[in-house]
Amino acid sequence: MRALVSSVIAAVLFTAIFGFAYPALMTGFAQVAFPEKADGSLIERDGQVVGSRLAAQAFTGPEYFHPRPSAVDYNAAGTSFLNLGPTNPDLAAFVDEQAQAILALEGPYNPGLEIGDIPVDAVTTSGSGIDPHISPAYANLQAARTADVRGLSLERVQELIDDATDDRFIAFFGEPGVNVLKLNLSLDAESAR
């Protein structure tokens, strides 16, 4: 009986400490030290939350830059990736479908565009399914279309791409990436002028 009482007390005590007190302390510390990040790195326009710097959204109009394909339809509540091996015919079909769609959309604005010119991130999902970044190569592929549809100069669109590009972490880790939401919001602001 003594062992049972000790076990129950330990379970209640550790649950209170590690299940409630520690998370509350860390949440409070994050709210004080990093309030924007603790709240999800949300982006607001005119008092309305339009998204997060950390999660992709579906942009499908020709006037917008498009993110990578998503295995979860850009739903941050259940992130996942397309779990298909390199020899799986379903993966080959998915990549081919994505590539054909890109050729159809971007081909008229990029004469001579071939399937080998399409960056890998344009036809594959990210590990989370909601990666907010695309490669600079994929952004540059979409630049001519976006500039033409919006009536902007290609040079101005390139400047906006550069402004929305996040460099490597500590100049060493990872690859540069273009934040699609940030870029599209910049394009909207530019078009509103």
Image (spheres, rainbow, N blue to C red):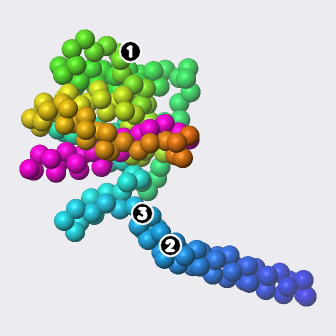
Q: Nearer the viewer, residue 95 or 48?
A: 48
State which region is magenta: 173-193
Classify mark 1: helix, strand or loop.
helix
Q: Is residue 159 visible?
A: yes
Name the mark on residue 40: 3
Q: Do the numbered discs 2 and 3 sit on residues whose CB atoms are within 8 Å?
A: no
Q: Measuring 31% from the left and 60% from the top, which residue is drawn there?
A: 43
- Badge 1: how crowded within 10 Å, few (<14), some, or many (20+)? few
**Residue 161: x, y in percent?**
29, 39
Residue assigned mark 2: 33
Labels 2, 3: front one: 2
Q: Upstream in the sequence, badge 2 or badge 3?
A: 2
Q: Measuring 31% from the left and 44% from the top, which residue is drawn there?
A: 163
Name the mark on residue 116: 1
**Residue 151: x, y in percent?**
9, 35
**Residue 66: x, y in percent?**
29, 38
| Mark 2 residue type | Ala
Q: Marks 2 and 1, Cα distance to the nearest angstrom?
A: 46 Å
Q: Marks 2 and 3, Cα distance to the nearest angstrom?
A: 14 Å
Classify mark 3: helix, strand or loop.
loop
Q: Do the numbered discs 1 and 3 sit on residues whose CB atoms are within 8 Å?
A: no
| Mark 1 residue type | Gly
Q: Is residue 73 visible?
A: no
Classify mark 2: helix, strand or loop.
helix
Q: Upstream in the sequence, badge 1 or badge 3?
A: 3
